[in-house]
């Protein structure tokens, strides 16, 4: 089937608002829903930066400000970055494996509806007194907070199931539904990223569930899990919380790294450098990521004897990460670069994530962490890796797969505007935060000492630029999806399996059962068997 | 609907019964031992070891881990080991 | 499901899994069990931490013999369940349904026993909110009990479907999957019984 026919038979838009077990529909539901939550979290961020552009309590009081920062973080983490990457996995993973759907299509649909339910409950918490304890919800503050905190806990409890069911689906699909010839070392790197992530999701998420259950029980059933008066240890909450939440950051970055590994070779017109090492590094990061959690607790009063092992593991994890960065650089080296929007965001990912990652190594060192813990150094670091890293990767993926998903091509110049505004905004917002933190500005405060004003002005201007940057993207998506030019099967002349079928793919993904008799990045060359080669290049 | 796997070894009823007997006898013995006032330290080690044995019997025979591809065993055991490390550390802080 | 079938049979979809000798539903169930290991682990870590840090004489209220008897019920229910599956595989429908029913009854009796034990403890002032021991004890055993309850309901559904001929020697996956869940819940209890009542 050609893309033209597929576009003409474009399914009714109503199916996206109903229960549907097709992974492509679910993928789109995820992508659109999570993007909506991104806008909610982003709006809150604009309010935060508006408050912080000058010292003094101007826009809102401390309590409301705490609700802003709590829900900005919670929304961005639980309702945007974690699930949007699952959305990509949903859409792309079966296609890259040559499968017709996920292993458990109904469980897949359930995962989406649990996401939506959890998300709406979290938004609902805003109306009953939103949680104010930071996205980290440390006890005992979270035990004593307003009613919204209970809804927050319920929301994340539900989201945890969505996440775990999704991860089980990705793992089982990859193991049991690969097309003929797709062996372990022929899995595309995006799939490797999803596998590595899914392992962490399955192992780590349930521990967060226990932490939340205990918080909810302390709030609603009179239990004493975190009551100092009863002899409990609030630090125990932190152990349970970070046991999940550290792997969570790798859950948030590994699929994005997988996207980068897909995009860079295509727009460098060169094979990926170090396929196997990137794959192994992804798995190593996932496993090691489950051994570092207490580096968030160096100043908590934890047993000092345990701090050093966690410092060591936290530094070790830089190694596989560095291996990947070098592999990506080697990939683009001497390549014929096509600086389209997916490529720009991917290159931006490398540079921004590098800065954030190095900041992380500083934080892993106990003596440094003791001074900068709970300062803006951490806020700068986390945003560099999560925004400069994950979100850049997410946008790379959105632009890259937009033609495949919609059958239409977006407007490239608007993509470039979005990218450059985002890059400038990222640097302007988050580098000053590192400096403010080093100078001693604490995080999660509505007011600050006058000496930090200039850095905050820069960060707020940068923040507003980031807010504006999203607008061309939204416009581009809406207009291009509605009436952009037909994209064809493979507008990027990429070499993975998903580009060998129409845009969008037919219901069962491939007209003929695909097979892989070579590497995952060799489709479209003349050596391929089966499905026809990609559209001819107009000069390479 | 489908059959679980074709052509794998079957554990027979007498093995199941034997496992059941061991589980019951060991548990009864454990309950009995708690009433005897023996030193708690060595009892603790013994009971923990026995609980692992009982768990392994149920997992190996009733859940067919012995007969099935090893990946299922890894999926079960590796998180359990990670968990044991976490429990150990959580009691230390 | 039906709309997806075009171009590929159900069998060919999971060809890769079959080549590895892996059934996708079983694999999924084991992964779910792994997540459950971690869930109970968080609760166990909390219980043990406070048991070690804050020894209390509230634990003296625990009746090891009563709960030992209850444990016997759950262990037996695992035995009857493997017998049920064996019966199904040998084509003995009567044995299959009978043993599945025994499993349900034993599970229900276990729950009754737990409920009785909880009521005794509450009468003696050991409650969810009386102390850290109460909080950790009732939460840990309560969640385990919840899992038993879910298992009992699941098994009842299987019995109803089984009497309508949904399962056979060639079609035993549903029972085996339930078995994995139920035996896992039993293993959790083996560990909990040791950690809470024995040591």
Image (cartoon, grey):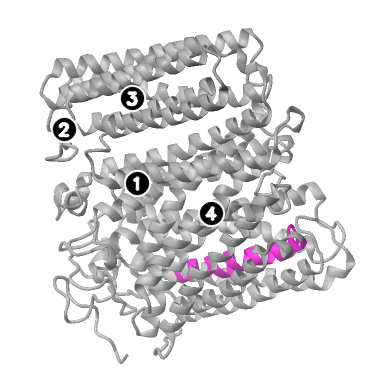
Label 1 sits on residue: B74
Q: Which mark is residue C154?
A: 3
Between the C-alphas of marks 2 and 3, the distance is 25 Å
- With A186 as the anchor, is A125 left or right in this view? right
Instruction: Single out the mark in the foreground, 4 or 3.
Output: 4
Q: Which mark is residue A291?
A: 4
Q: Residues within 10 Å of mark 4 (few under 14, many from 20)?
A: many
Instruction: Single out the mark in the foreground, 1 or 3.
Output: 1
- With A189 as the anchor, is C172 left or right in this view? left
Between the C-alphas of marks 1 and 4, the distance is 18 Å
- Chain where mark 1 sits: B
Given residues A258 and B72, the one toward you in this image is B72
- Chain where mark 4 sits: A
**Which residue is at 23% across, 16% downward?**
C99
Q: Are marks 2 and 3 on the same chain?
A: no
Tag 1, which secondary structure? Answer: helix
Majority secondary structure of magenta residues: helix
- Chain where mark 3 sits: C
Which percent across, then down, holds residue A65? Answer: 76, 52
Q: Reply yes or no: does residue A373 show up in magenta.
A: yes
Given residues A19 and A366, the one toward you in this image is A366
Tag 2, which secondary structure? Answer: loop
Magenta-colored span:
A371-398
Between the C-alphas of marks 2 and 1, the distance is 21 Å
Res A147 seen here: yes
Q: Are marks 4 and 2 on the same chain?
A: no
């Amino acid at each position: 089937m050609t893309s033209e026919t597929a576009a003409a038979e474009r399914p009714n838009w109503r199916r996206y608002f109903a229960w549907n077990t097709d992974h492509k529909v679910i993928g789109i539901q995820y992508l659109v829903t999570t993007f909506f939550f991104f806008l909610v979290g982003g709006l809150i961020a604009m309010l935060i930066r508006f408050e912080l552009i000058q010292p003094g309590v101007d826009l809102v009081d401390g309590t409301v400000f705490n609700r802003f920062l709590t829900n900005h973080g919670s929304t961005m983490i639980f309702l945007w970055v974690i699930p949007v990457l699952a959305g990509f996995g949903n859409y792309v993973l079966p296609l890259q494996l040559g499968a017709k759907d996920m292993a458990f299509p109904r469980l897949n649909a359930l995962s989406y509806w649990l996401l939506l339910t959890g998300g709406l409950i979290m938004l609902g918490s805003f109306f009953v007194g939103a949680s104010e304890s930071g996205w980290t919800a440390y006890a005992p503050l979270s035990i004593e907070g307003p009613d919204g905190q209970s809804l927050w806990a319920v929301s994340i409890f539900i989201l945890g199931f969505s996440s775990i069911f999704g991860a089980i689906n990705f793992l089982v699909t990859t193991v049991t539904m690969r097309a003929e010839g797709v062996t372990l070392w022929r899995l595309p790197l995006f799939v490797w990223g999803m596998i590595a992530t899914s392992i962490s999701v399955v192992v780590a998420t349930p521990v967060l569930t226990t932490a939340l259950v205990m918080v909810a029980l302390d709030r609603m059933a009179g239990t004493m899990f975190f009551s100092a008066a009863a002899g409990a240890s609030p630090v125990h909450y932190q152990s349970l919380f970070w046991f999940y939440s550290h792997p969570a950051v790798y859950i948030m970055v590994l699929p994005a790294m997988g996207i980068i590994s897909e995009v860079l070779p295509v727009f460098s017109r060169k094979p990926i450098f170090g396929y196997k090492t990137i794959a192994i590094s992804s798995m190593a990061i996932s496993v090691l990521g489950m051994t570092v959690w207490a580096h968030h607790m160096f100043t908590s009063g934890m047993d000092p004897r345990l701090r050093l092992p966690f410092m060591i593991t936290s530094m070790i994890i830089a190694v596989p990460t560095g291996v990947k960065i070098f592999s990506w650089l080697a990939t683009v080296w001497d390549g014929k670069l096509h600086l389209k929007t997916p490529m720009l965001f991917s290159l931006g990912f490398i540079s921004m994530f590098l800065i954030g990652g190095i900041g992380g190594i500083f934080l892993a060192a106990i003596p440094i962490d003791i001074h900068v813990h709970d300062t803006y150094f951490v806020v700068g670091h986390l945003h560099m890796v999560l925004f400069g890293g994950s979100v850049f990767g997410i946008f790379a993926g959105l632009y890259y797969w937009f033609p495949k998903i919609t059958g239409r091509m977006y407007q490239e110049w608007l993509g470039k505007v979005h990218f450059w505004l985002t890059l400038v905004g990222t640097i302007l917002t988050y580098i000053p935060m590192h400096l403010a933190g080093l100078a001693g500005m604490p995080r999660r405060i509505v007011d600050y000492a006058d000496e930090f004003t200039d850095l905050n002005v820069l960060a707020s201007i940068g923040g507003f630029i980031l807010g504006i940057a999203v607008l061309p993207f939204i416009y581009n998506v809406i207009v291009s999806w509605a009436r952009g030019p037909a994209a064809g099967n493979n507008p990027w002349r990429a070499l993975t399996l998903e580009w060998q079928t129409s845009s969008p793919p037919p219901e069962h993904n491939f007209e003929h059962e695909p097979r892989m008799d070579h590497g995952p990045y060799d489709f479209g060359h003349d050596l391929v068997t089966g499905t026809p080669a990609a559209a001819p290049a107009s000069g390479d | 609907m489908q059959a679980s796997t074709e052509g794998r070894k079957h554990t027979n009823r007498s093995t199941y019964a034997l496992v059941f007997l061991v589980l019951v006898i060991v548990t009864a013995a454990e309950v009995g031992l708690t009433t005897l006032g023996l030193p708690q330290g060595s009892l603790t080690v013994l009971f923990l070891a026995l609980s692992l044995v009982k768990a392994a019997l149920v997992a190996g025979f009733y859940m067919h881990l012995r007969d099935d591809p090893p990946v299922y065993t890894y999926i079960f055991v590796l998180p359990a080991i990670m968990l044991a490390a976490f429990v150990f550390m959580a009691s230390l802080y | 499901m039906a709309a997806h079938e075009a171009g590929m049979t159900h069998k060919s979809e999971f060809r890769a899994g079959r080549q590895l000798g892996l059934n996708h539903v079983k694999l999924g169930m084991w992964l779910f069990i792994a997540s459950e290991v971690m869930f109970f682990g968080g609760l166990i870590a909390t219980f043990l931490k406070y048991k070690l840090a804050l020894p209390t004489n509230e634990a003296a209220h625990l009746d090891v013999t009563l709960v030992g008897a209850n444990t016997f019920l759950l262990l037996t229910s695992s035995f009857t369940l493997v017998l049920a599956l064996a019966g199904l595989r040998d084509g003995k429908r009567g044995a299959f349904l009978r043993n599945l029913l025994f499993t349900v009854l034993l599970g229900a009796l276990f729950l009754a026993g737990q409920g009785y034990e909880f009521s005794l403890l509450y009468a003696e002032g050991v409650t969810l909110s009386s102390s850290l021991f109460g909080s950790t004890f009732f939460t840990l055993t309560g969640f385990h009990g919840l899992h038993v309850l879910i298992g009992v309901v699941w098994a009842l559904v299987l019995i109803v479907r089984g009497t309508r001929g949904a399962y056979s020697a060639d079609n035993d996956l549903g029972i085996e999957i339930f078995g994995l869940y139920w035996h896992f819940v039993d293993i959790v209890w083996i560990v909990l019984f040791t950690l809470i009542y024995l040591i």
